[in-house]
């Protein structure tokens, strides 16, 4: 259960950090957000990533949890990246 939670928090954290970038805001919502919402998204993204680290360190063997955390971070970043790439390609084919 910890692994699924770490992965979910990592995906959500990276999604918030991606939406805190002006480029992705314009891609997804056709306009940039105001600076306060961008700051909130950035803070929530980092908090979610720190939460996933806290879950990893609660494992009985914290060193194994830390290694698993790096794996979940990589997988979470990959999921968000694949989603961003797929969405931009689908939007590009719709515009043609």
Image (tube, grey):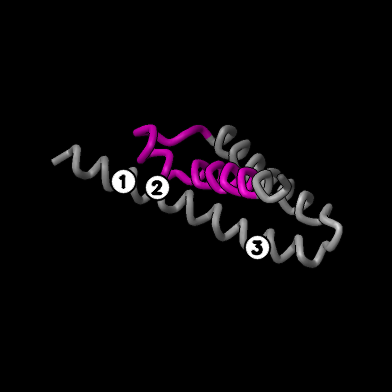
Q: Position of residue 62 (x, y in %)?
A: 83, 62
The numbered disc on residue 57 is none
Residue at (48%, 49%) from the top-left corner? 80
Is disc 3 placed on a helix, strand or loop?
helix
Q: Position of residue 94 (x, y in %)?
A: 19, 38
Mark 1 or 3: the one toward you:
3
Residue at (57%, 46%) from the top-left corner? 11
Residue at (59%, 33%) from the top-left corner? 36
**Callout 1 touching callout 2 (CB < 8 Å):** yes
In the rendered image, the quadrant that contains the N terminus is top right
Residue under circle 1? 88
**Callout 1 touching callout 3 (CB < 8 Å):** no
Indicate left or right for 26 with 75 as reference: left
Mark-to-mark CA distance, 3 and 2:
21 Å
Residue under circle 3? 70
**Callout 3 touching callout 2 (CB < 8 Å):** no
> Is 76 drawn above or below residue 62 in the view shown?
above
Q: Is residue 24 magenta?
A: yes
> Is 90 drawn above or below residue 78 in the view shown?
above
Residue under circle 2? 84
Where are the magenta residues, as a range?
7-34
Which of these two is toward me, 33 or 79? 79
Q: Earlier in the sequence, mark 1 or mark 3?
A: 3
Mark-to-mark CA distance, 1 and 3:
27 Å
């Amino acid at each position: 259960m910890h692994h699924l939670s770490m992965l979910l928090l990592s995906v959500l954290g990276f999604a918030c950090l991606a939406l805190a970038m002006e480029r992705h805001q314009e891609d997804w919502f056709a306009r940039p957000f105001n600076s306060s919402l961008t700051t909130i998204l950035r803070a929530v993204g980092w908090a979610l990533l720190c939460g996933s680290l806290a879950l990893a360190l609660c494992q009985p063997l914290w060193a194994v949890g830390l290694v698993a955390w790096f794996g979940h971070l990589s997988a979470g970043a990959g999921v968000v990246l694949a989603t961003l790439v797929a969405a931009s390609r689908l939007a590009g084919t719709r515009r043609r």
